[in-house]
Amino acid sequence: MAWIIFLAPADLGETVLASGAVAYALRDGADELTIVGRPEAATLLRGAPAAKIRSPTESPLAFAASVRLQPVRPDLLIDAQSGVAGRIIPAKQRIRLRPAEVVQHLTEAWGEAAGAERALAPKLWLDEAARAAARAAAPNAAPLLVLAPGGASANKRWPAEGFAAVARRLVGGPLSNADVILLGVGARDAETTRALASSLDADGVAARDLGEGLDLLAAAALMERATLCIGNDNVLAHIAAAMNAPTLTLFGPTDERVRAPFGSRARTLRSRPLEEIAARVPLDGANAMGDIGIDAVETAALELLHAGGLR
C-alpha cells in the first residue's frame, strides 16, 4: 500500500483529464490519496479510494514544505501543476507531463507519463452525497437536457441566446418531454445561467437554473443520467463526457486536439479552424465562439441523439 499525492491543476477541465492518471496510480490500492489544489478539484475527487482533502487555505508550496518535514516520504507524486511545489516534494516516484513534441490529447500524454500503454480515460468516483443531491435536483424520470453555458473567460462562451435557441428547438422536437437543467460553476457562471433561464422562460420553456445549486461531484451524478449535454469548453462538459453522457462541446480559442472532453459519446464543434483564429493578432477571441451557428449546433446535437438510438 502507498501514499499518493495529486497536485491538481488550476484548470478544472484539465483536472478531469488528469483523473485517469490518478485512477491508474490507484489500481493496486493506496493507504492515502492526498489531493492538493482548488476546493472544486478536491470536491471532484473526494469519492476516490483513500482520498484525503487538504485544507483549501493551504497553498501547494506550504503543503510541500510540510511534507518535507515528515519522516515518511510519499510513494508517488502526480504533479499536474509543474510548479515549485512539485519539485520540492520528496516523493519516491513522480509522474508529470513532459513537453509535448507533437500535438496529442492530454489523456494520451498522461498515459505516456504514467508508463501506460494507452490513453488514460478520466475517472470520477461518485459518493452517496453526490447521488442524493442529483436525485433531489432532478427527481423525475424524464430525459434530461443539460446546458453548461459558462466558461472561465468570455471568449470561451457561446452566446446565451444561442443555447436558448437550440434548447427551444430540441424541446419542440425530439426532447419534447425533457427536463431542461442549467449548470454552472458557482458564482463565476451565475449571471450566465440566470440570463439563459430568463430567456427560455420568456419563450415558455421551463428550465431549472442549478448554476449555484450543485457541487461538481453532484453534477457528475446528474450527468450520469443526462440524455444530452451541450456546453462550452468548461469543466462541466468534461464531467459529462467522463460520465459517458452524450456531450457536445463548443470550442473557440482553445485546442480540442489537446483538451477535448474525453468519452465514447463526446463530440466537439467549432466554426473556424483554430489556426485561422490564432493567426489573428490579437487573438480573435471575440468572434471565436460567436461564429458558431445555431443550425450547426442543432444538427450536431441531433446526430448525437440519433447515435444513441433516439429518433
Image (cartoon, rainbow, N blue to C red):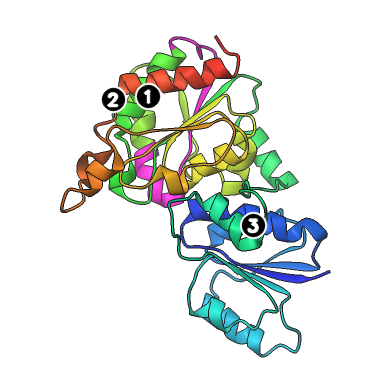
Residue 21 is marked as 3
Secondary structure under the numbered disc 2 in the rendered image: loop
Q: Is residue 181 above or below residue 36?
A: above
Q: Which image quarter holds the N terminus?
A: bottom right
Q: Earlier in the sequence, mark 1 or mark 3?
A: 3
Q: Is residue 83 above or below residue 182?
A: below
What residue span does the magenta drawing correspond to? 172-193
Residue 245 falls in image quadrant:
top right
Give the residue displayed 29% in from the left and 38% down from the top.
Answer: 273
Residue 92 falls in image quadrant:
bottom right
Q: In the depicted view, which residue is nearer to us: 91 or 143? A: 91
Horizontally, residue 268 falls left or right of residue 310, namely: left
Q: Which residue is mark 1?
A: 297
Give the CA distance from mark 1 to mark 3.
32 Å
Residue 79 is marked as none
Give the residue displayed 32% in from the left and 33% down from the top.
Answer: 160
Horizontally, residue 290 falls left or right of residue 297, namely: left
Reply yes or no: does residue 177 show up in magenta.
yes
Badge 1 crowding class, 10 Å Cα cut-off, few under 14, some 14 to 19, many 20 or more, is: many
Badge 2 crowding class, 10 Å Cα cut-off, few under 14, some 14 to 19, many 20 or more, is: few
What type is the residue that disc 3 sits on? Ala
Residue 293 is marked as 2
What type is the residue that disc 2 sits on? Gly
What type is the residue that disc 1 sits on? Val
Q: Is residue 213 above or below residue 31?
A: above
Asked if residue 92 can be seen in this view, the reply is yes
Badge 3 crowding class, 10 Å Cα cut-off, few under 14, some 14 to 19, many 20 or more, is: many
Q: Percent from the top left, x then y, of residue 181?
A: 50, 30
Give the residue displayed 57% in from the left and 48% down from the top.
Answer: 216
Q: Percent from the top left, x then y, of residue 186?
A: 46, 49
Is there CB contact under 8 Å for labels 1 and 2? yes
Secondary structure under the numbered disc 1 in the rendered image: helix
